[in-house]
Amino acid sequence: MKRILVLCLVVGAFFMACKTAKKEKEKMLKTEFVSFGEKISDENTITKQKMAKIFGNMNTNDTVNVKFVGEVDEVCQKKGCWIKVSLGNDQKAFVKFKDYAFFMPFNAAGSEVILNGKAFKNEVSVKELQHYAKDAGKSDEEIAEIKLPKITYSFLADGVLLASKVNEK
């Protein structure tokens, strides 16, 4: 009797997992990507969680070539010349674009993004942090509170895929 109950539970869990995987696949099929910079594909990407682990194991000024998927958290509101991408657990990657060859739309926050390029950990000066805060539209008071340099997870993207949802019919 116990074996039958266990078998039923295992089969039920299997079907639930298949249903969840099917929903995720359907979600991806409803997503179109707009390409910026070099042409890249969505193949061989790593998750934001794996990217966070890579950043966590890096030393300052280490560099790694990688492609990862995340969600745009913030966009430069002056030109779209940088974005912040959530890595989970309140961690973010600060992303610039190679040779300033392309920029992101101002309304990209909340969108899925696939980034290809170089990940590195670096120390950002107070002056540069204040500049980014100004670009982000922070108040003079908030900018004045920046008084110490900061170690950041940084990324120089040469190609980006920005997700945009297709209208369902």
Image (cartoon, grey):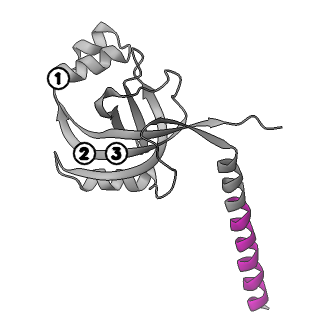
Is residue 99 left or right of 17 when viewed as pictured?
A: left
Callout 2: few (<14), some (14-19), or many (20+) C-alpha neighbours within 10 Å?
many
Q: Which mark is residue 120?
A: 2
Q: Are marks 1 and 3 in contact (CB under 8 Å)?
A: no
What SS does tag 2 mark?
A: strand
Q: Are marks 2 and 1 in contact (CB under 8 Å)?
A: no
Give the Cα separation between the discs numbered 3 and 2: 10 Å
Residue type, mark 1 in image: Val
Which residue occupies the foreground of this view, 134 or 10? Answer: 134
Residue 91: tell me if it is visible.
no
Q: Is residue 163 above or below residue 42?
A: above
Q: Is residue 148 above or below residue 162?
A: above
Image x and y of residue 113, in percent: 50, 40
Q: Quadrant of residue 124?
A: top left
Q: Which mark is residue 117?
A: 3
Q: Nearer the viewer, mark 2 or mark 1?
A: 2
Of mark 1 and mark 3, the one earlier in the sequence is 3
Residue type, mark 2 in image: Phe
The stretch of residues the image draws in magenta is 2-20
Image x and y of residue 116, in percent: 39, 46
Of mark 2 and mark 1, the one earlier in the sequence is 2
Quadrant containing the N terminus in the rendered view: bottom right
Majority secondary structure of magenta residues: helix
Which residue occupies the foreground of this view, 52 or 103? Answer: 103
What SS does tag 1 mark?
A: helix
What SS does tag 3 mark?
A: strand
Quadrant containing the C terminus in the rendered view: top right
Residue designated by label 1:
126
